[in-house]
Image: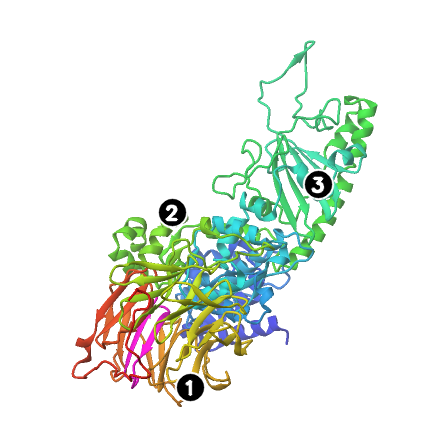
Amino acid sequence: MPAKNFLIAVAFVVFASPAFADDPKQLAASAQAVLKTHCYRCHGQDGAIEGGINYVTDLGKLVARKKIVPNEPNASRLFRRMDDGTMPPPGEKIRPTVEELEAIKKWIAAGASGGEMTPSRPTITTGDAYNFILADLETMDRRTRRFQRYFSLAHLHNAGLSDEELQTYRNALNKLVNSLSWGSKVVNPVAIDPLKTVLRIDLRWYVWDATIWNRILQEYPYGILEDTTAARAASVGTLTKVPVIRADWFVATASRAPLYYDVLQLPASITEVEKLLRVDAIADIQQERVARAAFNGSGISRFNRILERHDSAHGMYWRTYDFDEPPANLGDRLNGNLVPDQRNVFAFPLGPAGLAEFPFKHAGGEAIFALPNGMHAYYIMNANNNRLDKAPQAIVSDPKRPDRAVEAGVSCMSCHVTGILPKADQVLDHLTKNPKAFTRAEGDLIKALYPGKDTVIKQMEDDAKKYAETVAKTGARVSKYEAVSTITLKYEADLDLETAAAEVGLTTNALREKIDVSETLRKHFGALRAAGGTVSRQIWLQAFGDLTRELRLGTLFLASLNGPTNADNTGEIDPLESRDGTANQMAFAKDGLRAVVASGDRSVRLWDVEGRRDVKRFVGHTGSVWSVALSADGKYAISGSMDGTARVWDMYSGLQVQKYGEHSSLVSAVAFNPNGRWGISAGFDGVVAAWKVANGEEIWRLEKLGTVTAIAVDPTGSYLLVASNRNVEMLELATGKTVRTHGKFASPVVSLSISPNGKWYAAGSDDGTTRVWKLGENAAEFTLTGHDGPVRSVTVKDGGRWVLTAGADSTVRLWDTAVKTGAVATFKKHGQPVVSAAFLSNGTQTLSGDRDMTVLPWKIDKFFGNVTVEPPKRDPVKDPPDKIPYAKP
């Protein structure tokens, strides 16, 4: 049985069931089956959005959006249209039966229940999106990664949009990126996650580069720099600070000038555009290679309009000549006769100026031309052929835009859904009926340039057919409700509480609570606290910086801080560089008097903890520094940088004593072996290497490990822990041979630690989870949760009972694994994400440092209760007395 007939049969059988009238779920199921059979194709299937509805089978939304009024069939617009035969449209052969209409009516009359037909869906966090991106990048060759960029629909998914509604957004994105492309083929963004909420493009598909992406980011208001390993790895791989942007914002903004022009790389005059298209407009007119149509009443232009078609390198090039309407009392008199106005194309069909003795005088125009892939591009120009973002409303208008102005890009897409709109020429008929209105020469030229309505309409139809075939490749439809302009209007609409909450990754209750306790947020968004309250998109954008700070969403991206691009203009040389010298990692001396800091400004700093100042800076790296460690005797420091090098520094002199330069990307983790003779470095290039500090000679090297995010060396010298690909690998320190693997975990591991006796180790993750293992065991002994964000630092004591963690949530937490109720204490005095924390050798204090170089002590002995915590005993041979080699004796 065909699928449609089967659904009809199901609806009828359910409706005919004796229990039908009493069962809301059965009523809803029957109604949904009818709607899917007769309405879904135009109102949801593959993202179709006829009439602005793409959710016709979502019964709850039909009610929420007032298409259905519970208990009142006759007040329900959707039912009325089905009942009067206008939905489906009269041309549809398969019509709803009397029984099916009755099923819809009874469902509404019984309260229009949606039953339990909408399954719950998982929330997709920003962290999830970056994990998807990182996993996607790791499937590619590293040279390919710098060309990848991403668009996200996650916030719309979280706001409850159905799969059909999300497909409309995908269709709009597909259509727009291909309409901004100089590539030879239609290539649609690729979904990289199971729910298709994150989509990837390759800059090369559309002939874009870093300049184009950075131009987009200049306008992007929602850029937040996430303090997660996955986000950093994505930035390093793609060579951009912001590798992912919201798809709805992009559709609504890149479809409008000036960004539309800039992404499409269109010059400042239509004359220059014509050169790109290999069109010589003057020669085409002189040599009669054009086809024109002129008429009154175009529906867009307020007065006359001329359409003119040229062949171009990529197919067709249409341009218009539009005319402002002359005042009724205007007229020049010559020898007592009223001279026709040059804005009247029926009197002056030849031109423009310079190409006719008596040319028409146009006020401006628009151009539509085929791109290499067959999609269309648009241009608005004044009478001098110079580019305009918006057309003068005295000449043309767009009733769909808020200010009624015709905007380059979105207005053109909304109007020219089929391509050039077929319009019949009126000039040739005018000439035929008024042959004496022109000289014989003028008449012959008019006939050559205006071939007549049949010829021009045939050409329009041929062009439209080619365009429709190309649009179909994007998944969009050629219909009245064009995808890009529809999504633009949806984005520009006011935000309700549910939408606002989804855009910042919160539940509605959580956002309401945040607004309640923040005076700043109440001023901006207090309207959302009221039932049915909304805020305008403009207010939301204006206050987004305050929102980011109040909700601690991260660091707001500033396009002005983009760094220099690499030689091939595919991305930044160092997308992680910070000009204000933020701390990325710290290593503390055992006595806590000094810290060595990996700084975002390319330096390694020796920091006086008590004095809160630099003692000295170790300079040599050419990229931001992200990893640092001290040798056991405190005489040397090792650092890793975005420049692909690991460097060893003499702490006393501040001089570089060794450089290992065999990494091709960020060196994300460094360490010494216990005796300080080896350096171990690991990076986002998938390499882990052990090498001699004395001469840089490699001892062993592992490759293709994925994105390595952390390492830790066993203080007893037996093994090495490596975090990569959401796993923790245990390697033999001497050989690099794999001993054991833990994982895969839900998110990347950010930090690793091994207890002093080597019998316990711990791993902190991007998702705020810390796991503690006992040496030799496969399963974690303890799993600690509580951080709201990445665990940037973890330290575990002998015995595995006491664990210290520090996170991007600006807290330091002390855990007693013997207690199952969570952290026994939380230190909350940091104002920025904490990058490192450690137990001091006195056994009673910790030291922690955050992104803005604030280092704070924390006295913790009071939390140990009856447990005696003694300073570790020293072996006079293995553990010589602490020295301070960075200060003269």
Which element is circle 1 on?
loop
Label number found at residue 542 = 2
Residues rendered magenta in the picture: 788-811
- What is the crowding at mark 3: few (fewer than 14 residues within 10 Å), some, or many (at least 20)? few
Amino acid of disc 1: Ser
Q: Is residue 773 magenta?
A: no
Position of the N terminus, as image quadrant, is bottom right
The residue beneath circle 1 is: 718
Q: Residue furthest top?
A: 335
Q: Residue 241: where, in percent of width, then height? A: 47, 58
The residue beneath circle 3 is: 275
Query: Which residue is located at x 46 percent, y 50 percent?
Result: 559
- Kindly report the distance in space between the C-alpha atoms of the residues bearing marks 2 and 1: 56 Å
- What is the crowding at mark 2: few (fewer than 14 residues within 10 Å), some, or many (at least 20)? few
Earlier in the chain: of badge 2 and badge 1, it is 2
Q: Is residue 806 magenta?
A: yes
Q: Nearer the viewer, residue 608 or 61?
A: 608
